[in-house]
Image (spheres, grey):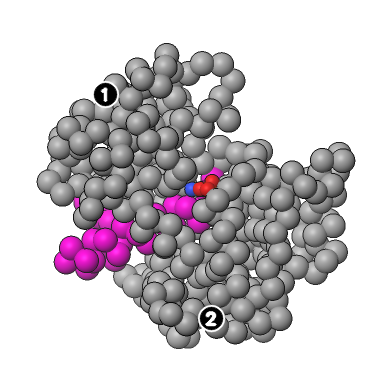
Amino acid sequence: MDARDHSPATGRFPAGRLAFPHRDLTAIGQLQRHEILYLLHEADQWVALNRQSAKHTDLLSGLTIINAFFENSTRTLLSFEIAGKRLGADVVNMHAATSSVKKGETLIDTAITLNAMRADAIVIRHGSSGATGLIADKVDCPVLNAGDGSHEHPTQALLDALTLRHALRERGDGAEDFTGLTIVICGDILHSRVARSNILCLTAMGANVRVCAPPALMPVGIEAMGVEVFHHFDAALEGAEVVMMLRLQSERMSGQFVPSAREYRRLYGLTAARLARAAPGALVMHPGPMNRGVEIDSEVADMAGRSLITRQVEMGVAIRMACLDILTREARGLEGWRA
Ligand code: CP
């Protein structure tokens, strides 16, 4: 496909415009709606490839991708690794816990070190908001944010959008975006980079986004992001077509934000009875990792035909393949962000 031949409805741009004019992917906030649609459109081919028995291409052959993770991860780290390998790149993982970070090396010195190894893309997860942007300024290759503090987790929002688009298509709704769809995001909105990236992504795609949390876990002024704020989960669920649950981010909390896990579940846990308040057939999402029996009951998390949670993991590989492909085009001598 010619990257210049795109229209907004499909994620394609008018002739003469770059499809994705960014060297890095550090935030959904940096993207326009048509750029999000373009990434989703590109990911579709990788969804199809990943469902075949032979899943390998040589597209990124000869390139080196470094995954530098300063925080724990299962889904994001593994899916970036699988994505890079399926595209034919050499992929290496740096775990901060076993690196020279433990000897006191700074984030900037670590970034300069990785850069000197001539990586063609660096994927970073870090506990500090803005860390990925800081590193992007210090290195010569594309940087992909795999989650930075409570700031953003852009590939999570993109994989969530891809998952939802596929689920809606299977239900016979072929719409490219989410215009008119009501989506509830419930949980620890205050500390969640997933919530922030999803709010930006879903509102850009036309969804009506409701956020629900106890007052202590709701950021002040979040209405400015174009969302409706709820503190009562039952009210937030009325008529909602999608319910996205988030875990309590205890690793980012100093002090006690909820009285107890039991009390939190009583007020904000997604049970089967509570899900019945949403629109008939409402879909359930969760970025993982889940705390079953706290923010979501197993009966809901495993509900066939309604829960998209394992599908989200599947789509994570495809969206990361799309991101790695697009961001390394410049390195491969193709039309990239600079053209
Ligand atoms: N959703 C997500 O980021 O999961 P991991 O922390 O396992 O990567």
From the viewer's perspective, tell me whether residue 154 is left or right of residue 96: left
Residue that appears at 55% across and 68% down? 83
Q: Which residue is mark 2?
A: 56
Is label 2 in a helix, a strand or a loop?
loop
Horizontal and vertical percent for residue 138?
Answer: 78, 55
Q: Amino acid at mark 2?
A: His
Which residues are drawn in magenta? 152-180
As drawn, the label of residue 232 is 1
Residue 258 to residue 105: above or below: above
For the question of whether residue 311 can be seen, the reply is yes
For the question of whether residue 206 can be seen, the reply is no
Instruction: Using the rendered view, name the quadrant where residue 176 is placed.
Output: bottom left
Question: Does the stretch in magenta take in 223?
Answer: no
Instruction: Using the rendered view, name the quadrant where residue 102 is placed.
Output: top right
Depth order, front residue of 96/239: 96
Image label count: 2
From the viewer's perspective, tell me whether residue 283 is left or right of residue 149: left
For the residues labelled 1 and 2, the Cα–Cα distance comes to 47 Å
Horizontal and vertical percent for residue 285?
Answer: 33, 47
From the viewer's perspective, tell me whether residue 295 is left or right of residue 319: left
Is label 1 in a helix, a strand or a loop?
loop
Q: Residue at the left extreme?
A: 280
Depth order, front residue of 297/13: 297
Labels 1 and 2 touching (C-beta < 8 A)? no
Horizontal and vertical percent for residue 22?
Answer: 59, 65
1 vs 2, front mark = 2
Q: Earlier in the sequence, mark 1 or mark 2?
A: 2
